[in-house]
Image (cartoon, rainbow, N blue to C red):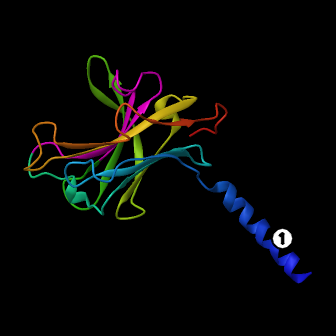
Amino acid sequence: MKRAVAVLVALGVLAPLASAQIIPTFRKDSATDGRGPLDIVRVAMSRGVDGRLRGEVTMEKPWTTDDLRTASGAPGSICLTLYTKRAPGSDPADWLVCVTPEKEGDLLRGRVLRDRANGLPRQVGAVTVTRPTSRTVYLRFAQSTIDRPTSVRFAAEAVTRGRRCPRPLGCRDTAPDAPTTGNLTLRTTAPSG
């Protein structure tokens, strides 16, 4: 009887935690197809219980902010490419969710960018950036910054710039290989985020 009560108590305590967990939609990529220090092996997206979206980009090997930094010129970046209306492969992404390094230190800055027909993408929102492991970066942002779509097709791209990388494009790796994407279906009744 005591054991049954203990199991029920444990289930009662763990049930809210289980419902708060994020179950991502993910795509894997080859571990040997990237050029440069950042080779993406997994990209994932999910919707958290708070309604925000979370992108997850994992590299084959550990990396640091310095892998994105350059002595001069534009830094490297890690971006989610999001398609909500356009067709992957034939059109540019509707949205970019990117992280870039600050000039000094380990801090990564995140931004949501909207593609424009007549100019460079413009920033429409902020991204919370965290590093749960030395190989992975999480990018959290509000659904409202990408107009609350019913679904999102997603991929990731890592760009580094170094002596052995072509200019001005740099060394790039995408996951999955274009035009393939992952697909995350979102509820239209999602909480504000």
Position of the C terminus by quadrant: top right
The one nearer the camera, 113 or 151, is 151
The one nearer the camera, 192 or 43, is 43
Q: Where is residue 141 in the image (x, y as percent from the top left)?
A: 47, 43
Residue that sits furthest to the right in the current view? 1
Where are the magenta residues, as a range? 73-99
Horizontal side of 101 relative to 150 (left or right) equals left
The one nearer the camera, 146 or 46, is 46
Residue that sits furthest to the top in the current view? 118
Q: Residue at x 32, y 53 (%)?
A: 31
Res 185 seen here: yes
Res 54 seen here: no
Q: Position of residue 30 (x, y in %)?
A: 34, 49
Instruction: Assign a secondary structure to mark 1.
Output: helix
**Residue 94 falls in which quadrant of the image?**
top left
Q: Position of residue 139 (x, y in %)?
A: 42, 48
**Residue 59 falls in which quadrant of the image?**
bottom left
Q: Which residue is drawn at 43% across and 62% down?
A: 132
Which amino acid, mark 1? Leu
Q: In this view, does 83 lie above or below 64?
A: above
**Residue 186 falls in which quadrant of the image?**
top right
The residue carrying mark 1 is: 8
Position of the N terminus by quadrant: bottom right
In the image, residue 98 lies in the stretch drawn in magenta: yes
- Count residues near mark 1 (Cα–Cα under 10 Å), then give few for <14, some for 14-19, many for 20+: few
Q: Which residue is drawn at 32% across and 58% down?
A: 60
Q: Residue at x 11, y 43 (%)?
A: 73
Horizontal side of 65 relative to 84 (left or right) equals left
